[in-house]
């Protein structure tokens, strides 16, 4: 990509990081950070045909506290229909389907992942394919969630516009995505410590094609009919890049409380946590 999806400027950028021979660019107009890699619009190959044990650990055990925190804050005492877009192996859909009062659906472009959700987790409500082709009715969802999805999407505008159209007027959109404000310093530190190793994860240039900040994510949401944009903190994933290392987990949990504290004392102007945003439809 050589166009900034946040402000639309073409070829007005500067390389700020490099991994696997791919430049990560910063838009010189609005500051948005994105990969120069031309990723496919729908990366169905994210989950390969063989789903490893590591994937289950990451999406089930490591995410469990975060999901429970989400449930306590956003599902408890309410009822309705929730759609998880890019639901992967389906563990979040399963979590919501077991919550009293909630009907949970998922869409997933990776066929092996969707098959796993259906066969192994017994989730008939998971649909394989693009969410836009699933035949969902307009204004039919109370809650739509995107867990670690938006950073993979080259053009977030068409997806967000579509999701806006299928959300009920009083519905809520939730997005969880990495925050460039932490990812970039982390990637630089890692490069400093281990050097430039092929295949190592720094900013995941081929997968994470847009890495948002609270500001750039708010801008793309506002451009697609959302307002009431509010960033919250959810208990973190209990793992660092899939590792079961207890020391790394302690650092991550400490960082979470530190980030919450920084948010508190700056009136949420400084966000150094992962981005977890709530948005509502404009005009409501
Ligand atoms: Zn820009």
Image (cartoon, helix red, strand yellow):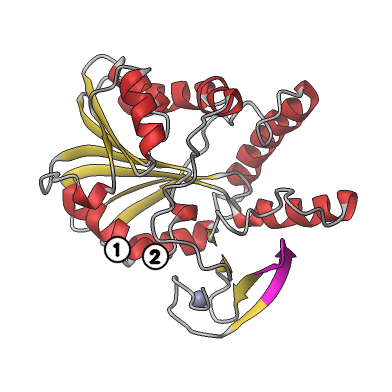
Determine if residue 93 is in view.
no
Figure check: 19 above or below 56:
below
**Magenta stretch, main secondary structure class:** strand
Q: Quadrant of residue 221?
A: bottom left
Furthest residue to the front?
A: 49
Q: Residue at coordinates 63% horizontally, 48% vertically from top-left?
A: 272
Q: Position of residue 36 (x, y in %)?
A: 58, 71
Does the closest atom of ligand 1 sit within 8 Å of the Cβ of label 1?
no
Q: Which residue is mark 2?
A: 155
Judge by depth and name the residue closer to the eye, 244 or 55.
55
Q: Does the magenta-highlighted stretch encompass residue 184?
A: no
Q: Do the numbered discs 2 and 1 sit on residues whose CB atoms are within 8 Å?
A: yes
| 250 with respect to 131 (left or right) | right
Q: Report crowding for label 1: few under 14, some 14 to 19, many 20 or more residues within 10 A (C-alpha).
A: few
Q: Position of residue 45 (x, y in %)?
A: 47, 47
Q: Which residue is mark 1?
A: 158
| 63 with respect to 132 (left or right) | right
Q: Position of residue 168 (x, y in %)?
A: 15, 44
Q: Report crowding for label 2: few under 14, some 14 to 19, many 20 or more residues within 10 A (C-alpha).
A: some
Q: Quadrant of residue 24?
A: bottom right
Judge by depth and name the residue closer to the eye, 236 or 72.
236
Magenta residues, as a range? 15-23
Q: Position of residue 261 (x, y in %)?
A: 64, 39
């Amino acid at each position: 990509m050589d166009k900034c999806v946040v402000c639309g400027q073409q070829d007005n950028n500067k390389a700020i990081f490099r991994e696997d021979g791919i430049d990560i660019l910063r838009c010189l107009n609005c500051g948005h950070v994105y990969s120069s890699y031309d990723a496919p619009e729908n990366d169905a190959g994210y989950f390969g045909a063989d789903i490893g044990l590591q994937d289950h650990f990451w999406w089930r055990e490591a995410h469990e506290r975060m999901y429970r925190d989400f449930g306590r804050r956003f599902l408890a005492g309410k009822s309705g229909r929730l759609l998880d877009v890019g639901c992967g192996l389906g563990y979040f859909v399963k979590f919501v389907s077991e919550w009293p009062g909630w009907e949970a659906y998922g869409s997933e472009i990776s066929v092996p992942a969707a098959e796993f959700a259906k066969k192994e987790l017994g989730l008939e409500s998971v649909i394989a394919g693009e969410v836009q082709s699933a035949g969902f009715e307009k204004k039919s969802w109370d809650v739509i969630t995107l867990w670690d999805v938006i950073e993979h999407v080259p053009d977030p505008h068409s997806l967000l516009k579509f999701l806006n159209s299928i959300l009920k007027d009083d519905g809520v959109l939730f997005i969880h995505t990495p925050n460039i404000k932490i990812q970039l310093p982390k990637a630089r530190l890692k490069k400093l410590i281990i050097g430039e190793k092929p295949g190592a994860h720094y900013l995941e240039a081929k997968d994470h094609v847009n890495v948002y900040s609270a500001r750039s994510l708010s801008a793309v949401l506002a451009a697609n009919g959302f307002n009431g944009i509010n960033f919250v903190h959810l208990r973190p994933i209990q793992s660092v890049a899939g590792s079961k290392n207890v020391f790394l987990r302690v650092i991550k949990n400490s960082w979470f409380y530190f980030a919450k504290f920084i948010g508190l004392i700056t009136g949420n102007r400084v966000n150094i946590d992962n981005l977890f945003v709530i948005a509502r439809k404009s005009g409501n």
